[in-house]
Image: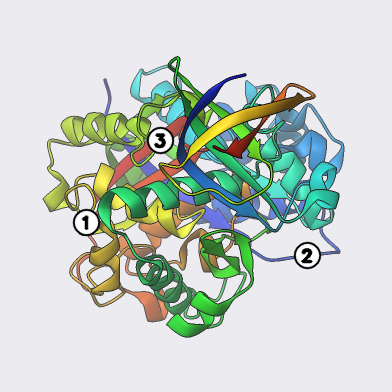
Amino acid sequence: MRSGTVYTETVIYSAPEAFLADVPYQTAIVSLDGGGRVTGRIAGERVSIDDRVVEVEERGGVPFFRKA
Amino acid sequence: MRAVAVIGIGKTPFGAFADRDLRSLAVEAGEKCLRNGHVEPAQVESFYLGNFAGPSFVGQNHLAPYVSTALGITGVPSTRIEAACASSGSAFFHAWSEVAAGIYDIVMVVGVEKMTSQPTARVSQILAEAGDCSGEMKAGSTFASLFAMIARRHMHDFGTQREHLAAVAVKNHAAGALNPDAHMRKTITLEQALKAKPIAEPLTLYDCSLISDGAAAVILAPLDRAREFTDKPVRVLGIAQASDYVALDQKDDITTFPAVRRAGEKAYAMAGLKPGDIQFAELHDCFTIAEIIATEDLGFVKRGQGGPYAFEGCTSLHGARPINTSGGLKSKGHPVGATGVAQVCDLVLQMRGQAGERQLKRAELGLAENLGGSGATCVVTVLGAA
């Protein structure tokens, strides 16, 4: 699984209709160790910019990361 | 290339109008504009409609002739432009291109959006379709969350504070309270802005623009014919449209908008002006951080200084360079497809001395910046008293 560093993040309280059940949830743009960035969800503990994260699963094409 | 002037303007009030449909709003703005410019529908040679998501919001497509024929404009090219929240800025750019190139003389642009017939979560979903639906939006992003992530990084890189963001909201509400056509005519305090409910951290409710219904219209003509129609023409001194990646995660640095910088540089060059020459501006404050970054990307301040610039009052109605004297998207409202043309109307009102309680003493050189999505489209227009 991929790993990387949090480039930026937010916690969402007002969601589109498809995500209303998940509120609040954290999304982040992760700078991947192999290069490039990806937008994913954060599972578990909240993360901040520069935190190290690892990918724990992929759901419907969306990577979920957890604090390393 | 011919010099081009704005010869007529017209707007509806912005707000939540349960009894109004998209076409009636567009027609109201269009008819006001035709009267304002002393133009007959039969004189309009080409028609542009700026609209982001009429098909999703109200279930109607083929919108340009749907609106133009209702204005009595028939037979001529009638074209809809979609560029997210820069839809009518882009429509204005293309209308200007036709007049500047000498293809047509009298070209009309109407921008319209009817948003409030849908619940907020549905509106968020429709707006999200202006992002990258194969990546960032699939992860549950909203536009507020994309700009929240931009704000977080700007705070991290430059020390921008929550108070700086809130100051933009307070300032724009103060101006909007004086605008009879604004959606939310109320002043707010810094404390109210800071303590409002979170939307996407660090943005609160007051960092976000409004979900509005409304329409705005302008008519363009060659400068050398402008006085056939109006004794108060306003000249388009410079204009440019630029583009960038749709997905935020494809950008190297999300604390700046390359499309804003590029459009600004080209518009300044066409006008033969420098950022310091601009006396006042309507900037795309879809979220407070967007106005802060726009002041940096347009060269009003150095990178990273946009927060203190707003907080210190430099951009307030009585500041050195007033920004969003209309109240901006924050307080005037943001019917997304109407916004770009509405910004032009608001600059023209100031330049004609018709801005009422918001009237500036110096309003000869103004700039409008209309941003689409999280920066994938930008149109910058510099206007000057003709």
Question: What residue did someone put label 1 on?
Answer: B305
Q: Distance between the residues labelled 3 and 1?
A: 23 Å
* Mark 3 residue element: strand
Position in image of residue A53 (x %, y %): 53, 35
Identify the mark at residue B379; answer none if there is no mark.
3
Left or right side of B304 for B344: right
Most extreme residue toward the front is A68
Identify the mark nearer the N-term, 2 or 3.
2
Question: What residue did someone put label 2 on?
Answer: B17
Position in image of residue B116 (x %, y %): 78, 57
Q: How crowded is mark 2: few (under 14 residues within 10 Å), some or many (20 or more)?
A: some
Residue B201 vs residue B359, the one in the foreground: B201
Identify the mark nearer the N-term, 3 or 1.
1
Quarter of the N terminus of chain B within the rendering: top left
When the figure is inspected, residue B105 is found, relative to residue B352, above or below; the finding is: above
* Mark 2 residue element: loop
The residue that appears at 43% across and 52% down in the rendered structure is B151
Task: Please report contact status of discs 2 and 1: CB closer than 8 Å, yes or no.
Answer: no
Q: Can residue A26 be seen in this view?
A: yes
Q: Distance between the residues labelled 2 and 3?
A: 28 Å
When the figure is inspected, residue B278 is found, relative to residue B355, above or below; the finding is: above
When the figure is inspected, residue A32 is found, relative to residue B48, above or below; the finding is: above
The residue that appears at 31% across and 60% down in the rendered structure is B160
The residue that appears at 76% across and 46% down in the rendered structure is A16
Identify the mark nearer the N-term, 2 or 1.
2
Q: Which amino acid does label 1 sit on?
A: Gln
